[in-house]
Amino acid sequence: GESVGLHLPTLSVQEGDNSIINCAYSNSASDYFIWYKQESGKGPQFIIDIRSNMDKRQGQRVTVLLNKTVKHLSLQIAATQPGDSAVYFCAEKDPGAGKLIFGQGTTLQVKP
Amino acid sequence: DTEVTQTPKHLVMGMTNKKSLKCEQHMGHRAMYWYKQKAKKPPELMFVYSYEKLSINESVPSRFSPECPNSSLLNLHLHALQPEDSALYLCASRPQGGQGTEAFFGQGTRLTVV
């Protein structure tokens, strides 16, 4: 499958391959992280979340990995489908202020 | 009902106009947010309301004025905007408290300032 070690704005994968989207977060005190999917002209849609006391969480076809040592988050999508084409954002929550702050986003393009 | 409803979906306004964006949720969420999103950029936090009180203002210009009339409604009043304020304005809500709960987003209002 396709993956990126550092954040890249665009990831292009073949239908059926696995995708890995990476995100670096900024605040070591953040206690909760969310991956959102945003399709053109729509609001962000929840995909999966993870709390800071976990390293990994699995959903349907998606897995989120959290590495607090290097402040890194990744989203793995298994058997990527054309309907997965969208912009993917990670978001971190500051426990003190209650802010939910978004990362830069990665555009996932799925080739048929 | 897990929806956050924003109206209008599209808005075109002149720089001397006054308009308002509306957001409504009936999930009992006590934290509500306004975000601004420019094309190909992540949403940027503008305001946070907690239990109907403004808790965070991210140094937003005063031409944007938020209001939370009750626990289900959030407004954003706009006055004397500039063309660079054209963007997608997103509202979100989440339960207050608890370590981790997702924020639900509306579909946004596409604002064009002419």
Image (tube, coloured by chain):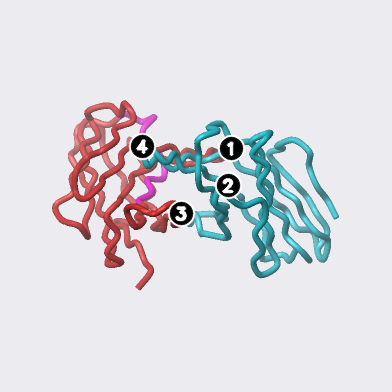
Chain colours: A cyan, B red
Residue in the image at 78% along x and 66% along y = A79
What amino acid is found at the position of numbered circle 3 in the picture?
Gly
Q: Are marks 1 and 4 on the same chain?
A: yes
Residue at numbered disc 2 = A89
Residue at numbered disc 3 = B100
Sequence-earlier tag: 1 or 4 = 4
Mark 2 and mark 1 in contact (Cβ < 8 Å)?
A: yes
Task: Determine which of the numbered discs, if any, sits on residue A97 in the image.
Answer: 4
Sequence-earlier tag: 4 or 2 = 2
**Rendering quarter of residue A7:** top right
What amino acid is found at the position of numbered circle 4 in the picture?
Ala
Chain under numbered label 4: A
Say whether residue B85 is magenta.
Answer: yes
Indicate the quadrant containing the C terminus of chain B: top left, top right, bottom left or bottom right: top left
Residue in the image at 68% along x and 33% along y = A70
What span is in magenta?
A: B82-91
Residue at numbered disc 1 = A104
